[in-house]
Structures are given as structure tokens and as C-alpha cells.
Amino acid sequence: MGTQNISSLKLSSSAKKAAEELLKAHPEVVFTSGRREMKDQARAMASNVVKNRNWIKQTYRANKASRECQKWVDDNPDAKTQAEIAAGLLKTLNGLGTAAGEISKHLTGDAFDVQPVTKNAA
């Protein structure tokens, strides 16, 4: 994704500036995500929870949103597929109102992800 596509990430102004600076310094960087809707955040989290049921508490800072999402995972051991887990996490996040925003800066456009870099990684 080149500079012309940073706008497709729907980033906040400060995150967009940081992404542009990163790309200028490291033109090989590939952006993989930016602002996420709640359903996209739930799906992204679920893709990791399928592999590790403790992923939320091991990854996110402790706050109401992360605790409630981890509680849903713990309380629903029969939910095993990404779709089942994403649906449960989305319902949990939607029930949190504004507190749901605590889970990730992706929801406000203040975060972006990049593919792991190996060339000149240091």
C-alpha cells in the first residue's frame, strides 16, 4: 500500500501523519489496517482468540472493555469458530457503549498495523 493508499486507512490526522512519515523513512513498509468498525475489531480479535483463548488479556491493557471481552470468551467455552467468537465479542462491545473504545485505538483511527518487516528490521 503506497502513499496514495494511506487515505484508505481512514486514520486520524495524527496517525495519518505518522503513517506518512513511516512510509517516507521506510518505503518498503506495507500497511495492513487502520480505522476499524466495531464488527471488524471483533473479527480481528476473534481470529486470535481462536488460537489462544487468553489472547485478549495477554494483549490488551486492562480496562472495562478488555475485561468484558475476555469474560465473554471465558464464559462461552463452546464458542470455537472465529464467526461464533466474533459475534459474541461484537455483542459485548456494542453493550459497552462508549467504554468499547477502550479496547483499541483502531476504533478511533488512531492506530494502524503494518506487515512484519525483516529487511533492515533493526
Image (cartoon, grey):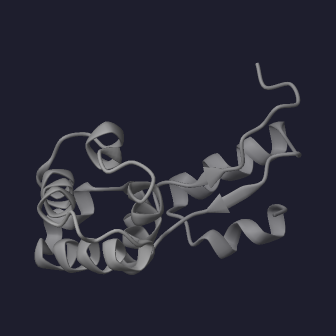
- Eyeballing the image, is 85 above or below 110? below
Task: Say which of 4 and 74 sits in front.
Answer: 74
- Residue at the farthest front position: 78
Image quadrant occupied by the C terminus: top right
Residue 68: % across, % down: 13, 59
Side of 49 where 70 appears, left or right = left
Residue found 57% across the figure and 55% down from its top: 112
Q: Viewer-proximal residue, 111 or 52?
A: 52
* Residue 52 in the figure: left or right of residue 3: left
The image quarter containing residue 7 is bottom right
Question: In x, y percent, where is residue 101?
Answer: 26, 63
Q: How many labels, in total?
A: 0
Residue ID at (56%, 64%): 34
Residue 52 position (above or below residue 38): above
Residue at 78% x, 53% y: name it: 30
Q: The N terminus lies in which quarter of the figure?
A: bottom right
Percent across and percent down for residue 2 are: 84, 62
Q: Is residue 18 left or right of residue 13?
A: right
Q: For the point 82% across and 37% down, which residue is it?
A: 25
